[in-house]
Image (cartoon, rainbow, N blue to C red):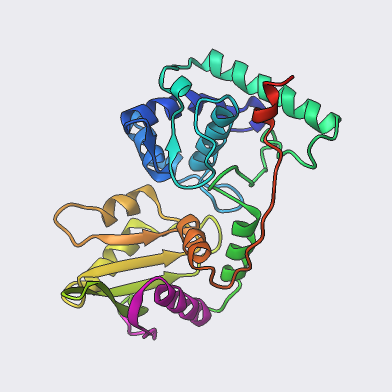
């Protein structure tokens, strides 16, 4: 989209509701993204397009659509985890015209809130270069953490990934590295229960924003792990191309778990590794709107 002033993300309002209905009225963000892509047969070049921040433009737009649906009371307001249709949302089917009316309504509400200084700041989604996104796609903490991780040395990033895996329940985690590692940066053991455990190999890719891990790289990693471990993980500070995701989940081949920048931030936050927790309260304009 040449200019976000055209609010292209409005076109996803209806597809978000449809995708959630298809998923049984609720779903994880990644499930919603995948369902929309499947329902609308979105080409890989669209799914692989990124913002300046390195985040997926498609996912960013869908997250903005979800945010407006939250304000409108069609999707539950939970900021993390599962996206869930409200009772009103389950019965709502939106045309693009109706979606644009919702968009314009909330643009006006936020403009009035800024004018009356009822909120300190409202992120303006009308700016094309706006890398911030609502909900899970981008937060201030996510941006700062990713910038820090991308500033590490390659070996430093491998070591911090080792600590992340340890904090996440892996045992005997070691970084091997080296130029002759066959694409393997380290290994560990994940114990499911006292009777079952898996050896896991991992690869760390400290990529700059927008530099996606390719299908060939996923295939090369899988080839390197065959016969050496039951499971493989690729961790990156960027993302994966649509073809890479397909390759990682290809039937008949060992599955490779993919950890992109968004999931990586979630993992750091879950175990609070290298992070200091803080609480921030934002005004919920949707709540107060019914009292106007």
Instruction: Answer with the quarter of the image where residue 257 lies.
Output: bottom left
Instruction: Answer with the quarter of the image where residue 248 lies.
Output: bottom left
Any part of residue 61 in sight: yes
- Taking the spot 73% from the left edge, 24% from the top edge, the residue there is 109
Question: Which quarter of the rendering shows the C terminus?
Answer: top right
Horizontal and vertical percent position of residue 241: 40, 51
- Between 178 and 175, which is closer to the camera in this rendering? 175
In the figure, is residue 52 to the left or right of 20?
A: right
Asked whether 179 falls inside the magenta stretch, the response is yes
Residue most extreme to the front: 291
Horizontal and vertical percent position of residue 265: 52, 61
Instruction: Answer with the quarter of the image where residue 178 lies.
Output: bottom left
In the figure, is residue 86 to the left or right of 114?
A: left
Horizontal and vertical percent position of residue 219: 27, 62
Asked whether 140 falls inside the magenta stretch, the response is no
- Taking the spot 62% from the left edge, 69% from the top edge, the residue there is 148
In the image, which residues are magenta? 154-181
- Between 148 and 277, which is closer to the camera in this rendering? 277
- Between 48 and 83, which is closer to the camera in this rendering? 83
Any part of residue 3 in sight: no
Using the image, determine if residue 267 lies above or below residue 90. Answer: below
- Between 211 and 21, which is closer to the camera in this rendering? 21
In the figure, is residue 262 to the left or right of 5?
A: left
Horizontal and vertical percent position of residue 8: 57, 28
């Amino acid at each position: 989209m040449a200019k976000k002033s055209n609010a292209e993300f409005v076109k996803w309002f209806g597809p978000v509701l449809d995708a959630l209905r298809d998923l049984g009225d609720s779903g994880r963000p990644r499930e919603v993204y995948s369902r929309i892509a499947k329902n609308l047969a979105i080409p890989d070049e669209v799914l692989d397009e990124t913002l300046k921040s390195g985040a997926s433009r498609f996912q960013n737009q869908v997250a903005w659509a979800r945010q407006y649906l939250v304000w409108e009371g069609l999707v539950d307001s939970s900021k993390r985890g599962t996206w869930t249709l409200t009772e009103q949302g389950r019965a709502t089917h939106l045309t693009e015209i109706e979606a644009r009316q919702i968009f314009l309504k909330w643009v006006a509400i936020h403009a009035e809130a800024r004018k009356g200084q009822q909120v300190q700041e409202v992120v303006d989604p009308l700016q094309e270069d706006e890398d911030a996104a609502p909900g899970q796609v981008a937060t201030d903490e996510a941006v700062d953490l990713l910038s820090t991780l991308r500033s590490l040395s390659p070996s430093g990033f491998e070591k911090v990934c080792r600590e992340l895996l340890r904090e996440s329940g892996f045992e005997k985690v070691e970084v091997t590295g080296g130029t002759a590692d066959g694409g393997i940066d380290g290994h560990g053991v994940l114990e499911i229960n006292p009777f079952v455990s898996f050896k896991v190999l991992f690869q760390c890719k400290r990529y700059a924003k927008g530099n996606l891990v390719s299908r060939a790289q996923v295939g090369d990693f899988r080839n390197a792990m065959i016969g050496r471990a039951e499971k493989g993980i690729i961790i990156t500070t960027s993302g994966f191309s649509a073809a890479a995701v397909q390759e990682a989940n290809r039937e008949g081949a060992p599955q490779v778990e993919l950890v992109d920048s968004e999931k990586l931030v979630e993992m750091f936050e879950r175990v609070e590794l290298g992070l200091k927790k803080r609480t921030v309260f934002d005004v919920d304009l949707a709540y107060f709107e019914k009292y106007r």
